[in-house]
Image (cartoon, rainbow, N blue to C red):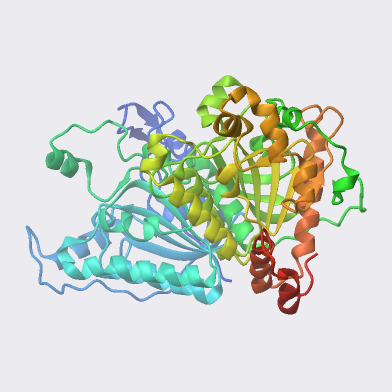
């Protein structure tokens, strides 16, 4: 591929920060990537400068795409529309408000479409919509990830309803990339509004944003005039939107190339799994008779022990290169569910887990590991991403149950869990679940419809908490130990009942006594389960999972039916 280097104009000798009005020496301003070293204010970059910063060695190849702005309405305000276009072209050196190119980011190939706010406010006209669509079609033809950098005030009024049509046109182009399994990444820069915000900027698989970047459909002034209220200063900022589940990650400008490169490599490289370790028959027990009888109530207490490693701990020890993604794109970012892209034993996976904590403060911040509907919807979004990119899904279960509050019910807790059950049963990628602590009710099952379900030796899994069962049936919460025994919640019982496929032997003293050994056991067990599933086709993976759950409480010989379709389950 022939690459060219675009050079930016020389920086002025001094730059006045538009945020704090501090004069900054031009070379210092440039070294700091146009971010004020005094107040941290991010200032816009030209499309060419943005490309230089994102691609490896600043080298990219502009795409030879033909798209022209016309004047279909004969539009005139204070000046004719063609005159406005001519002035923008002369001032920016660009033909339109978006520049499309090929390049490599972190070693991975990408097609990039970068908007420039200087060109008529980055407005979405027919030519911009055409260029975004053409770039998407190049990405589709080459099966290369598409990276879109947005900066826009909205649709271009001078082109009337034709500019509105570009929203649907670009959305359809991204839909084709979804169908083809091609990763799309959006980088939101300040500002991104109107038709761009309501189309390609928010339709990508992953939405990144620079600190402080504003994103919205209607502008702040319009909203305040409409509702006749003063909005908070942080309204529509990246930080505001991440809390509300719209933005995946806020990434400082200096780290954008690294973070985007990690995403592209996860999508482009199926990875080579590490060599299989020598079989260790003692590591994962599959025969319940090999497990000792355990006091059920004591096992419940061990499963809840705050010294046990949590999902976040395993993400740092059993997995590598974890990149957390946030938000359900609807209502929020539940802190009780953590997920994103990672590697396990050398292969890319999507990993999702419920997070409790080790301290009172963290437990409170994580809602004691009890997910809200936004947590299940975030998990569903990540599982759909895994399906699109053909990545295995690994889930870690550790929750007393879904949050039983009024807010959760108003936001559709039951619907969110039900949707996850249906989605997981339909996935055509491998799914492996590990119960690392407490598996409580439908709140646990909402992340546990898997091909293989494993559990640590001191984990528990039940339809209801022992205390809840005691209060309902014995009318006495103090009868919790008796209820725990009756519910058969221990790992031995779960293996005997076929609810789990294997039990991970814990280190002496439990997983909290030797977190490193526990992480090694989890990594080896999940890697083995994924290798066991490698030989199944997408249709067989789905049939295997459905057959696994079809057998519970059934008199049908489901196993024989599955053999005829998929071969024996292993």
| Residue displayed at 55% across by 43% down | 443
The number of callouts visible is: 0
Rendered residue at 52%/40% (across/down): 402
Furthest toward the top, the residue is 360
Q: Residue furthest front?
A: 474
Horizontally, residue 532 falls left or right of residue 448, namely right
Based on the displayed image, in which of its 4 quarters is residue 358 positioned?
top right
Front position in the image: 451 or 529: 451
Residue 536 or 476: which is nearer the viewer? 476
Q: Nearer the viewer, residue 269 or 433?
A: 433
Q: Is residue 522 above or below residue 277?
A: above
Above-or-below relation of 86 to 521: below
Q: Where is residue 11 shown, x and y percent of the image?
A: 39, 43
Point out the image quarter for the N terminus: bottom right
The quadrant holding residue 427 is: bottom right
Dividing the picture into quadrants, the one containing residue 548 is bottom right
Q: Is residue 326 above or below residue 184?
A: above
Query: Going by the image, does 125 lie left or right of 524?
Result: left
Residue 553, above or below 25: below
Front one among 97 and 309: 309
- Where is residue 450? Give x, y as percent: 66, 56
**Left or right of residue 40: residue 448:** right
Residue 314 seen in the figure:
no
Residue 28 appears in the picture as rendered: yes
Residue 324: give x, y in percent of width and height. 57, 44
Residue at 36 percent of width and 42 percent of height: 410
Q: Quadrant of the C terminus?
A: bottom right
């Amino acid at each position: 591929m022939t690459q060219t280097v675009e050079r930016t104009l020389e920086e002025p000798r001094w730059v006045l920060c538009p945020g704090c009005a501090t004069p900054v020496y031009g070379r210092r301003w440039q070294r700091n990537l146009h971010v004020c070293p005094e107040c941290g204010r991010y200032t816009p970059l030209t499309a060419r400068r943005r490309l230089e910063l994102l691609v490896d060695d600043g080298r990219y190849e502009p795409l030879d795409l033909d798209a022209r702005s016309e004047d279909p309405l004969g539009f005139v305000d204070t000046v004719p529309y063609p005159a406005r276009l001519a002035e923008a072209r002369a001032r920016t050196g660009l033909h339109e408000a978006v520049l499309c190119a090929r390049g490599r980011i972190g070693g991975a190939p990408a097609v990039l479409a970068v908007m420039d706010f200087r060109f008529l406010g980055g407005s979405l006209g027919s030519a911009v919509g055409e260029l975004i669509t053409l770039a998407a079609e190049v990405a589709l033809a080459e099966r290369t990830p598409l990276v879109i950098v947005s900066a826009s005030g909205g649709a271009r009024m001078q082109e009337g309803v034709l500019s509105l049509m570009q929203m649907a046109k670009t959305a359809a182009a991204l839909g084709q990339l979804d169908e083809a399994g091609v990763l799309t990444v959006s980088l939101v820069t300040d500002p991104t509004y109107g038709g761009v915000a309501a189309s390609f900027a928010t339709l990508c698989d992953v939405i990144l944003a620079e600190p402080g970047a504003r994103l919205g459909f209607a502008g702040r002034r319009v909203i305040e005039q409409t509702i006749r209220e003063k909005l908070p200063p942080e309204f529509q900022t990246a930080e505001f939107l991440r809390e509300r589940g719209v933005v995946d990650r806020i990434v400082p400008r200096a780290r954008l190339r690294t973070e985007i490169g990690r995403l592209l490599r996860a999508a482009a490289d199926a990875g080579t799994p590490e060599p299989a370790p020598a079989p260790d028959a003692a590591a994962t027990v599959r025969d319940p008779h090999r497990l000792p009888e355990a006091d059920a109530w004591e096992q419940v207490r061990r499963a809840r022990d705050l010294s046990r490693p949590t999902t976040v701990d395993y993400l740092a020890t059993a997995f590598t290169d974890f990149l957390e993604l946030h938000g359900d794109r609807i209502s929020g970012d539940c802190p009780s569910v953590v997920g994103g892209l990672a590697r396990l034993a050398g292969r890319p996976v999507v990993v999702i887990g419920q997070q409790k904590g080790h301290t009172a403060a963290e437990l409170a911040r994580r809602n004691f590991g009890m997910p809200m509907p936004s947590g299940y919807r975030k998990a569903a979004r990540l599982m759909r991403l895994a399906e699109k990119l053909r990545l295995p899904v690994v889930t870690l279960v550790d929750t007393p149950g879904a949050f039983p509050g009024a807010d959760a019910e108003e936001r559709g807790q039951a619907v969110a869990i039900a949707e996850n059950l249906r989605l997981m049963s339909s996935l055509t990628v491998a799914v492996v679940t590990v119960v690392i602590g407490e598996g409580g009710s439908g709140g646990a099952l909402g992340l546990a419809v898997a091909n293989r379900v494993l559990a640590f030796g001191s984990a528990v899994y039940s339809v209801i908490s022992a205390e809840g069962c005691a209060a309902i049936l014995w009318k006495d919460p103090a009868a919790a130990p008796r209820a725990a025994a009756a519910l058969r919640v221990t790992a031995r019982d779960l293996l005997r009942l076929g609810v789990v496929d294997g039990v991970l032997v814990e280190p002496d003293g439990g997983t909290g006594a030797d977190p490193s050994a526990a992480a090694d056991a989890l990594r080896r067990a999940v890697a083995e389960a994924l290798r066991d599933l490698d030989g199944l086709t997408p249709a067989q993976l789905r049939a295997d999972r459905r057959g696994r759950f079809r057998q519970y409480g059934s008199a049908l010989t489901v196993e024989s039916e599955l053999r005829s379709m998929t071969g024996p389950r292993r």
